[in-house]
């Protein structure tokens, strides 16, 4: 079976220099011919940036490139730290890639060792963990160990979003944000809070008390009903200059692990991960 994408014209690094079929890559008169390998690499980066993690086959199909070319581009991006191969056999851009368009990114630099520590601790933790940051009006999953965990009921993948107020990660980020940022976020989120939160927080004062309790104990908690059992989660903030820029969370079945057990067994690991300390 051929490894080329079906029903498409396939291009590789040895195609004619003028790329006659690809007008978008034609250079203005008098300019040198484009560096084809660089063009292909940038196409792969743009595609991963637009669609999130993808398999080699999907990239090949989308870009109408031979898989050998795609594999070379991906291998180069991985070797230079701009992409990574996930356990799901898909490739994704790393936080380092974001600096290409915005220059130095203090948050990206802060989260890089956190991601490393997250995966280093996955075998010890066993339950699925995630790294999330606020991407208003939701929490954006930056990374997870779901594919490495044998206990994941559902997979939280990079690029997915989850609600702020109903998740431990969102509550941790809210609680440890600066007072001004927290007040602004609550102003925006409160009118559209899910109905299931009304009994928990009948008014904003109740929410503020909960956020104060989170700051006092150093971590947030949340419960989510599943078909078989309830899922508990605890999360700790990732701080940069005293401000919460993300949160690290672990999810577990409450029928197997109580919150008190999770606090004793899992919280120390989460705190080390948030500091970027590999275990």
Image (tube, rainbow, N blue to C red):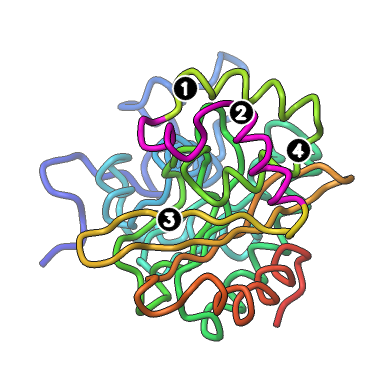
Mark 4: secondary structure = loop
Which residue occupies the foreground of this view, 92 or 199?
Answer: 199
Quadrant occupied by the C terminus: bottom right
Q: Nearer the viewer, mark 1 or mark 3?
A: 3
Query: 10 Å neighbourhood of mark 1: few (<14), some, or many (≥20)?
Result: some
Q: CA distance from mark 1 to mark 4?
A: 48 Å
Looking at the magenta stretch, what is its main secondary structure?
Answer: helix
The disc placed on residue 175 is none
Quarter residue 197 falls in: top left
Tell me which label, 2 or 1, sits earlier in the chain: 1
The relative height of residue 279 versus residue 205 in the rendered view (above or below) is below
Which one is in front in this view, the residue at disc 2 or the one at disc 3?
Answer: 3
Residue at the spot of label 2: 32
Q: Check disc 3 and report the residue beneath it.
A: 223
Pair 1/4: label in front: 4
How much space separates mark 2 and mark 1, taking CA atoms? 10 Å
State the separation of the CA atoms marked 4 and 3.
Answer: 22 Å
Tag 3: Cα neighbours inside 10 Å, few (<14), some, or many (≥20)? some
Is tag 4's residue or tag 3's residue first in the polypeptide sequence? 4
Residue under circle 1? Answer: 26
Q: Are marks 1 and 4 in contact (CB under 8 Å)?
A: no
Name which of mark 1 and mark 3 comes first in the sequence: 1
Q: Secondary structure at mark 2?
A: loop
Left or right of residue 189, residue 114 in this image: right
Q: Quadrant of residue 216?
A: bottom right
Tell me the magenta residue range: 194-215
Q: Nearest the camera: 250 or 84?
A: 250
- Name the residue that disc number 4 marks: 177
| In the foreground, 43 or 147 | 147
Structural distance between the alpha carbons of marks 2 and 3: 60 Å
């Amino acid at each position: 079976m051929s490894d080329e994408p079906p029903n498409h014209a396939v291009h590789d690094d040895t195609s004619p220099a003028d790329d006659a079929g690809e007008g978008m890559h034609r250079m203005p008169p008098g300019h040198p011919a484009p560096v084809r390998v660089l063009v292909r690499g940038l196409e792969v980066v743009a595609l991963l940036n637009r669609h999130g993690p993808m398999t080699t086959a999907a990239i090949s199909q989308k870009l109408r490139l031979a898989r050998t070319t795609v594999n070379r581009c991906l291998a180069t991006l991985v070797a230079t730290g701009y992409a990574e191969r996930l356990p799901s056999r898909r490739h994704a851009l790393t936080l380092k890639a974001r600096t290409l368009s915005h220059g130095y990114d203090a948050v990206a630099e802060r989260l890089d060792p956190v991601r490393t520590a997250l995966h280093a601790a996955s075998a010890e933790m066993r339950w699925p963990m995630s790294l999330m940051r606020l991407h208003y009006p939701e929490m954006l999953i930056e990374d997870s160990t779901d594919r490495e965990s044998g206990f994941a009921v559902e997979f939280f993948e990079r690029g997915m979003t989850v609600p702020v107020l109903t998740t431990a990660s969102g509550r941790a980020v809210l609680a440890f944000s600066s007072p001004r940022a927290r007040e602004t976020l609550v102003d925006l989120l409160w009118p559209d809070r899910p109905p299931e939160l009304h009994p928990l927080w009948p008014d904003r004062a109740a929410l503020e008390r909960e956020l104060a309790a989170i700051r006092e104990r150093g971590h947030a908690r949340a419960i989510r009903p599943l078909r078989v059992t309830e899922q508990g989660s605890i999360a700790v903030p990732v701080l940069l200059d005293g401000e919460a820029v993300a949160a690290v969370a672990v999810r577990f079945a409450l029928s197997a692990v109580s919150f008190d057990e999770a606090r004793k067994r899992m919280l120390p690991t989460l705190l080390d991960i948030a500091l970027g300390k590999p275990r």
